[in-house]
Image (cartoon, coloured by chain):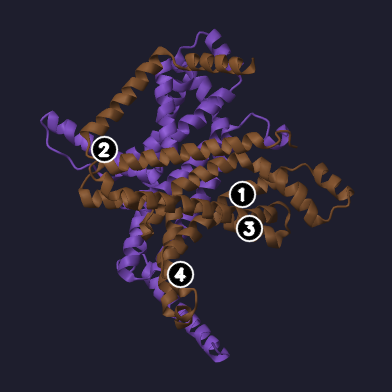
Amino acid sequence: MPGEAAIINVVARTSLWLQPHRIVLILIALGLVLGATFFMRWDWLPQYYEMGLLGIWRSLWILAVTCVLGFLLAVPLGLAQATGSFWFAAPAKVFCTVIRGTPLLIQLWLLYYGLGSLFPQYPWIRESWMWPYLRQAWPYGVLALTLSFAGYEGEVMRGAFAGVPKGQLEAARAFGMTRWKTFRRIWLPQAFYRALPTLTGETVLQLKSTPLVATISVIDIFAVSSKVRQDTYLTYEPLLLLALIYMTITGILVFAFSRIEARIPNKIG
Amino acid sequence: MTAADASNSGTTLIDALLSASAAGIIELLSPYPPGWGGALLVGLLHSIEIALGATCLGLLIGTAGAYGKLYGGPVVRDLLAVYTTIVRAVPELVLILLLYYAGTDLINQALTAMGYQRVDISGLAAGIAVLGFVQGAYSTEVIRGAILAIPQGQIEAARAYGMSPGLLLRRITLPAMLPFAIPGLANLWLIATKDTALLAVVGFYELALATRQAAGVTKAYFTFFFAAGVLYLLLSLFSNLIIGRIEAWSRRGMPSLKEAR
């Protein structure tokens, strides 16, 4: 009876976890939540509900796009640092050092206010097809977050590429694989598996960086909560709800990545 | 666009960059009043002060937290788990806003309840407290891992010598965990220096806010944000230099990493 055994297992684990002091702590937490629900003002919720959902959607969209683009940029950065000649490795190293050595907020403002203020001086930029995009804030936000993710992940990928055992690559060459095929079938997948655990952390860090785009007037969920605070003069309620939303997203991300990690072959190297 | 147009726009670009550069930039960045270099340096000083204070506070919280997580009772352990989980799952920007408002509010309510006047909390103290609280959660995990990496025999030997817990902490645990903790703590210090920039959003006067003000007044956005980036980068590179020294010092007497491999 595997099902029965599983149920007994779950019950046993739950009873181990649910010690008396935890029950008290959970009750206290429930009391706090109920107190917050009844004694704080939540009447603004229906009015800002749709704006909030749109904000969450934008935050998630920015997170997904910048993580994917940043990772695609991190692969050549890591490869250049791991094996490239000096002329490839040095620029990649400088890029990673600069990105990791300066605050994201400064990078964001440098791109948006700095570059953004230089562009309109040139008529040929204003007449080009890019201008409708360059006038908005979100391309700068996406660019800054992508570069930042690439800088941090490039360093991780450098270690991951360097960590793949030489024997694997030699075996691939002995099989007569071309360099591109070796990279595609052997080197990149194994490096990716090695980098996956850190990728979880990096993605959560990236999620925690997304509210910075609110400082350059992109309306993400953080900006929505700021608007609620300005409109209603409430301090705590929007911020607490915002914290709860970010915690939920973090929880989902960590859970999803743990499922992906469980599926990869764990005997690497 | 014709070739003539292109070359024309190219020369205007160079002209604009040149006119903005050289004399103009030096004048803007000069440390004496017409220039804004002095304001930036004061901002950098404030950033370093806040980062230093926050890291020290974070180390205190982290050491206490790690001890609580390792040796505390079940309630302390669970509360610390809640603290580290929540702080590490919520963006620093949100935490800074929440803690800043909640902290100043609570202190003022306590003061009025005790019959004192309301006080204005200084930006420096509030910044250090808020960032220190955030850093504390991360350092708790780093120090907990480092203490677990100490060979258990060393702590047992100290206990066998009859050392009191305080002496054990001072003579054995802290020095022995240091080589394991330094890389993580160094990372946290770099994060702290960069997180000070977030305090600009709440209105603390530090490098990012100083830069923003200077750029807003002079309209030379690119120059000033670039200069601020260079200052932050220099701070990071200088920190790396110092950290290398500290790491070598903390590992004195141990086999070097290259030999250990």
Residue A248 is left or right of residue B255, and the answer is: left
Which residue matches tag 3?
Answer: A92
- Alpha-carbon span between mark 2 and mark 1: 38 Å
Kindly identify the amino acid type of the residue bearing the numbered disc 3: Ala
Kindly check if marks 1 and 3 are in contact, taking CB atoms under 8 A apart as contact.
Answer: no
Asked whether the residues under marks 2 and 1 belong to the same chain, the reply is no
Amino acid type at circle 2 is Ala
Return the chain for callout 4. Answer: A
Residue at left offset 27%, top offset 44%: A45
Residue furthest to the left in view is B115
The residue identified by callout 1 is: A155
Residue in the foreground of this view, choosing between B50 and A29: A29
Q: Position of residue A28 (x, y in %)?
A: 32, 22
**Residue corresponding to mark 4:** A133
Q: Which-is-in-front pick, marks 2 and 1? A: 2
Could you give the CA–CA distance between mark 1 and mark 3, rounded to whole angstroms? 9 Å
Q: Viewer-nearest of labels 3 and 2?
A: 2
Query: What chain is the brown one?
Result: A
How crowded is the residue under tag 4: few (<14 C-alpha within 10 Å), some, or many (20+)? few
Q: Are marks 2 and 4 on the same chain?
A: no
Residue B154 vertical placement versus A78 (above, below): above
Colour in which chain B is shown?
purple
Residue type at mark 1 is Glu
Image point 44% across, 72% down: which residue? A132
Chain ID of residue with mark 3: A
Q: Is residue B126 visible?
A: no
First along the sequence among labels 3 and 4: 3
Eye-nearest disc, 1 or 4 = 4
From the top left corner, tell me how far across and down residue A198 is, in percent. 59, 41
Task: Kindly indicate whether the residue at mark 1 contacts the one at mark 2 (C-beta within 8 angstroms).
Answer: no
